Image (spheres, grey):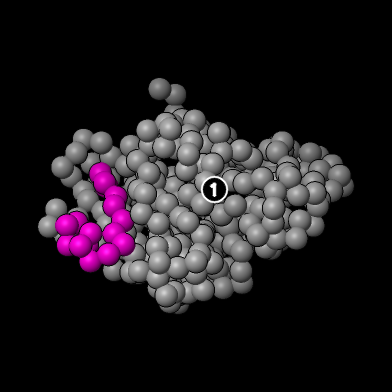
Amino acid sequence: MKLPTMADHITDLYVSHCEADEQYLQSRGFKKVNVDLNKGVGGNFIYIWYRKQSGHAPITKIQLTFNDEMARGLDRVGYTKIDKDLSAGAGGDYIYLWYYRGSGEFNTPIVDIYVTTVAESEVCMLRNSWERLTCDLNRNSKGNWIHVWVKRERQTYICDVAATDSFSSDEQMLRAGYIRMDEDTSRGGKGSFVFIWYRQTINPQRALTDLQVSTNGSERQVLAQRNYQKVNVNLNEGTDGSAVYLWYKTGESDNPIKATVLLLNPEAVKEHENAGVNVLKRNLNTGNKGWTEYLCFYQ
């Protein structure tokens, strides 16, 4: 197998809002991901652009933010913000893209980037080792469900999962190499901002082999008896709903987890189920009036 060279890695990212932006980026060797980030809602024609430069450090992590609190930890640990709203003119949340050039065990260089606008594309992308950023770029507008995807130079596996119910530990999590799944697990439930986090490894022997979700006491008891480990943050924290927890297991299988995805789009849930994907059909917003959210994972 041919391993990527430094010139294969994405080293720079940018976003265009207008034709003048596009001309500027083209003149500097950037390539456009030719999918409008405002598809289905009007607004500006917005595109992501990338560049690969020999001798420059590769980008290893990309995060999205939809409020100011999410941005603080990223800024403190050295993420670079592209200060152009990814949903400008669409009437939804202000969404920004941040990237990081890291090194070490939990940083695998990114070699490609893409954008999807329909649920039918997701299963194929994931099966071909693409990794989906969680936040919908049309969040709180009425257009297509739009997701950014990245591909890394080597296959990665999920080796740790965690959760937070406040922004106070974001800096600590980011410095420890975690990636935030940038969507609130209790969205619409009027509770705390709760996020799931994960770390990646290129070593399948270190990977998690199963994930589960509990929504009541009896489910928690069964999972504990089956030697699952609980992530000790209620994914429904602050709502009037049930206590919901994420559980994980290592070993006991030769089938490591390659990716985990948070599903809010009902069409995406249907596509994943029809494809036989491990969709955990226990709503993370059980017992409240928030969005129906399911976690799934790929092996």
The spot of residue 42 in percent (x, y) is 80, 49
Q: Is residue 247 above or below residue 56?
A: below
The spot of residue 241 in percent (x, y) is 40, 70
- Determine the residue located farthest toward the left in the rendered image: 225
- Determine the residue located farthest toward the top in the rendered image: 1
Q: Is residue 89 left or right of residue 250?
A: right
Q: Label 1 amino acid?
A: Asn
Q: Is residue 141 visible?
A: yes
Q: Is residue 258 left or right of residue 90?
A: left
Q: Residue at x 47, y 56 (%)?
A: 292
Near-viewer residue (25 or 223): 223
* Residue of label 1: 265
Q: Which residues are magenta?
A: 208-223
Q: Is residue 82 visible?
A: no
The spot of residue 32 in percent (x, y) is 72, 38
The spot of residue 141 in percent (x, y) is 69, 56
Quarter of the image with the C terminus is top left
Near-viewer residue (147 or 275): 275
